[in-house]
Image (cartoon, coloured by chain):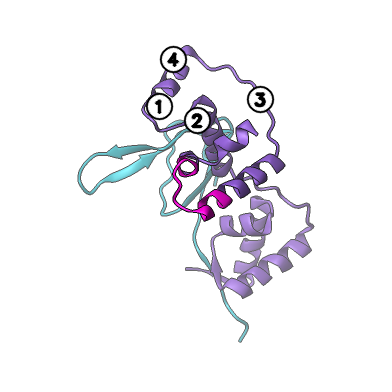
Amino acid sequence: MDYYEVGDSVHGYRIRAEARKISDPHVIAKSGRHKAQRVILTENAEAIIERKLVWIPEQ
Amino acid sequence: MFYGILDLGFESVINLFQPKSFLIRLTFLKHMMDAARSEGQVIGSKVSAMELEQIKKLVASGVYLNTSDFLRDAVRDKLAAIKTIKYRDVDYVTAKKEVMGYFQDRGEAYPSEIEEDLELDYKLICQIVDELKREGRLAVL
């Protein structure tokens, strides 16, 4: 599924993103527990949610 | 030679003038010889007056030896921060074998880790991972 509209958002534990330009991280401190860092990707920005994959050995 | 001496850092220069031990002097001489062997290149770059003023303030406060020292440190930091991933041109079958080998070796991994370690295109890895999931050889943790 690809999303292109303004306001579309991606949420995940781990997101792989790429773009032509990436800003330096800025710390966002909303409350004591809610701390995050924000980066802005510009030009051909793309992001995808990743999950860790496990190898299943043949029985 | 001038650049080499600056590369040694402030502490080494101070040590030269303190007769602590002969060993320190020998170490300094070795550093100087190494620096002389690796000749640097001079590059020119224009910076704004405000930026230059900020650099001069840092130099005056003793954080850096001089403007060149600041610029060298900035270049080193930038080069260390940017890691280039060059994708190898590998066909699907070979790439699949490599990805399977990677998982057999490591047990678990994120696709972006495979991308970085095997230098394979991320979309190709996603295709392979999807196929391996369909075949029942991979599962999401």
| Separation of marks 2 and 3 at Cα, in angstroms | 14 Å
**Chain A colour?**
cyan
Choose the circle earlier in sequence order: 2 or 3. 3
**Chain B colour?**
purple
Numbered mark located on residue B70 in the image: 2
Choose the circle earlier in sequence order: 3 or 1. 3
Q: Secondary structure at mark 4?
A: helix
Asked if the magenta segment contains residue B21, the reply would be yes
Q: Do labels 2 and 3 touch, CB within 8 Å?
A: no
Which amino acid does the dot numbered 4 rest on?
A: Met
Q: Do labels 4 and 2 touch, CB within 8 Å?
A: no
* Residue that badge 3 annotates: B43
Residue at (57% x, 77% y) in the render: A56
* Residue that badge 1 annotates: B58
Residue at (20% x, 42% y) in the render: A31
Residue B87, given in percent of the width and then of the height, sits at 71, 50
Numbered mark located on residue B50 in the image: 4
Residue B84, given in percent of the width and then of the height, sits at 64, 45
Which amino acid does the dot numbered 3 rest on?
A: Ile
Choose the circle earlier in sequence order: 4 or 3. 3
**Residue sitting at the far bottom:** A59
Which amino acid does the dot numbered 2 rest on?
A: Phe
Choose the circle earlier in sequence order: 4 or 2. 4
Choose the circle earlier in sequence order: 1 or 4. 4
Q: Nearer the viewer, mark 4 or mark 3?
A: 3
Label 2 CA crowd tier, 10 Å (few <14, some 14–19, many 20+)? some
What residue span does the magenta drawing correspond to? B14-27
Q: Which secondary structure type mostly characterizes the magenta part of the structure?
A: helix
Q: Nearer the viewer, mark 1 or mark 4?
A: 1
Residue B99, given in percent of the width and then of the height, sits at 67, 65
